[in-house]
Image (cartoon, grey):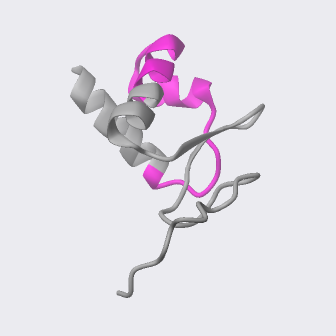
């Protein structure tokens, strides 16, 4: 699997979950090493701006747009746009 496909698959896995997923499970689902998963998560955060939260001892979670994750506050400068 190439890097782009792995990052896209990682994003889809995180997007489709409402509960944290462990590094071990991500590694198994993506069929790659744990360090590779960590690099892919960092790339999602840094280059794509994905709001991936690390929940110590529980795993990783992608925050829903406009909804802060556990222990995080919404950006005070953020305003919701009408639908």
Q: Residue at x 23, y 29 (%)?
A: 4
Residue span colored magenta: 15-40
Look at the image and tell me in which quarter the C terminus lies.
bottom left
From the viewer's side, name the closer residue of 11 and 46: 46
Q: Which residue is drawn at 53% across and 54% down?
A: 17
- Residue 36: where, in percent of width, then height? 44, 15
The answer to whether residue 58 is magenta is: no
Q: In this view, does 78 lie to the left or right of 76?
A: left
Q: Can residue 16 be seen in this view?
A: yes
Q: Residue at x 46, y 77 (%)?
A: 80
Residue 61 to residue 46: above or below: below
From the viewer's side, name the closer residue of 33 and 44: 44
Identify the residue at the far bottom of this view. 82
- Residue 6: where, in percent of width, then height? 31, 28
Q: Is residue 63 left or right of residue 19?
A: left
Q: Residue at x 33, y 40 (%)?
A: 48
């Amino acid at each position: 699997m190439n890097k782009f496909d792995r990052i896209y698959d990682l994003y889809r896995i995180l997007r489709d979950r409402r509960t944290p997923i462990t590094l071990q499970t991500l590694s198994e689902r993506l069929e790659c090493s744990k360090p590779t998963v960590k690099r892919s998560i960092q790339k999602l955060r840094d280059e794509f701006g994905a709001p991936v939260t690390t929940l110590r001892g529980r795993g990783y979670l992608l925050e829903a747009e406009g909804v802060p994750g556990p222990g995080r506050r919404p950006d005070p400068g953020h305003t919701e746009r009408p639908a």
